[in-house]
Amino acid sequence: DAGVIQSPRHEVTEMGQEVTLRCKPISGHNSLFWYRQTMMRGLELLIYFNNNVPIDDSGMPEDRFSAKMPNASFSTLKIQPSEPRDSAVYFCASSGQYGTVSYEQYFGPGTRLTVT
Amino acid sequence: QKEVEQNSGPLSVPEGAIASLNCTYSDRGSQSFFWYRQYSGKSPELIMFIYSNGDKEDGRFTAQLNKASQYVSLLIRDSQPSDSATYLCAVIRNAGNMLTFGGGTRLMVKP
């Protein structure tokens, strides 16, 4: 089975540019999560979708960040404009949730973003 | 107080020994508990999950949960150098689906 797929794996961009990160969850999973990991702050949840609907975006740092999930097999995380402090590894994860039962989250390989 | 706390380490154990990793959480309503292993430069990899009080064993790994004391631990028996990684404890706090992660414990297994 293919796991969570993310692209690109590495992104280097200049401050002020728009960055789009992409994620394809595991087939059959109905929950999708975007995380950011830095040495200083560890692993932080940015936003969580269930059945393609954003459920909690309280972790999104500011309006420069936006996320969409147009269908069950694709999600994007966009940063516009990007800043050097956005440099981090961004992970996408997916899981199943049915009623109140939540299942294990599986992570993609991550996108390492560097903003210069 | 952080929601999920782990000693950052490094925890150093000799090859063949038992490594004991601990995690405490603040929300008594927490229901599900997970251990992830993360090698340097890689993504977190799920290795154990536990939902009920007591022990759960899977190969060389044992997860232990004590809800009354609000702690969860991971034991790694017969530790190998390949077990050297950062171990992340994660908690689902209620009926939702959001993981809260601890800061991770770095484990070093010395040959």
Image (cartoon, rainbow, N blue to C red):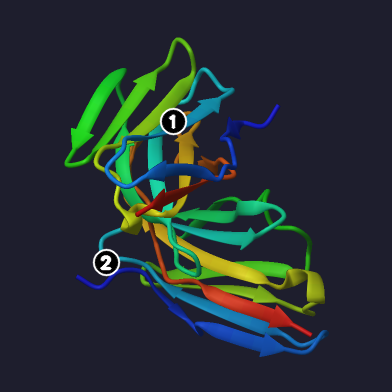
Observer able to see residue B16: yes
The kind of residue on which mark 1 rests is Ala
User: In front: B62, or B45?
Assistant: B62
User: In front: A8, or B44?
Assistant: B44
Residue at image position (36%, 34%) is B74
- Mark 1, residue position: B95
Q: Element type at marker 2? A: loop
Q: Is residue A95 left or right of residue B60?
A: right
Image coords of residue B83 (percent x, y): 34, 53
**Tags 2 and 1 touching, CB below 8 Å:** no
- Mark 2, residue position: A27
Whether residue B42 is situated above or below residue B85 in the rendered picture: below
Image coords of residue A68 (percent x, y): 56, 69
Chain containing mark 2: A
The kind of residue on which mark 2 rests is Ser
Q: Neighbour class for label 1 at 10 Å: few (<14), some, many (≥20)?
A: some
Disc 2 with disc 1 on a shared chain: no
